[in-house]
Amino acid sequence: TNGKNKNGKATKMGSLKKWFSRFGNNNNKTDEQKAHNDIEKRIQHHKKLENTTMSMLLLGAGGSGKSTVLKQMEKIHSQKYNDEEKTLFNAINEVHKNITLDIYDLCKYYYQLKQKDTQQSIQFESSDIENLAIKIATTHDPIHNNKLTKEFANDIELLWNTKTMKTVYEIRKKSHIMDNT
């Protein structure tokens, strides 16, 4: 029907079509088709991604290596760097991590020795250096913050060049088992 009834009068549906036709051209179907095709392409793209993505559930107690496995998988499968760059970066990163963990351990051990009544009177050469060691022992988070910044490297150098830190190292070396894996 063309929007008119048998008597030639306009029907309600015909009037509505005529009224709606004033709001735009009849290209609505092509616009809708373009939107539909775009949505279908996105769905197909996501399906391809789902087919190439592997999901894993890592369970284990704290400290069992879940994060380490995840980081290693990311490093192995990352397309960002070539193998030589990855190896060099990993080696440098591990050295930095070990340095930060070791200085934290030494400062923490110094702080523990200070808390005990020992016959060895361990004292830093200045209160500023002692405060730095105590600050690292009590506020530094070596697990989540193992970046070796220039400022932190300077603090480590300052601490390591003291006789007291070398004494703490010698005391700790006798009874400490390294656990920097």
Image (cartoon, rainbow, N blue to C red):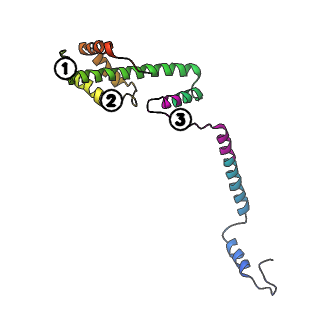
Q: CA distance from mark 3 to mark 1?
A: 48 Å
Q: Is residue 49 part of the magenta span, yes or no?
A: yes
Disc nearest the viewer among 3 and 1:
3
Q: Is residue 146 left or right of residue 127?
A: right
Quadrant containing the N terminus in the rendered view: bottom right
In the depicted structure, whether residue 18 falls above or below residue 116 = below
Q: Amino acid at mark 1?
A: Ser
Q: Say which label, 3 or 1, has the lower sequence index.
A: 3
Q: Residue at x 58, y 21 (%)?
A: 83
Dot label at residue 126: 1
Q: Which residue is mark 3?
A: 58
Q: Which residue is mark 2?
A: 140
**Disc 1 on helix, strand or loop?**
loop
Q: Is residue 33 part of the magenta span, yes or no?
A: no
**Disc 3 on helix, strand or loop?**
loop
In the depicted structure, whether residue 158 falls above or below residue 9 = above
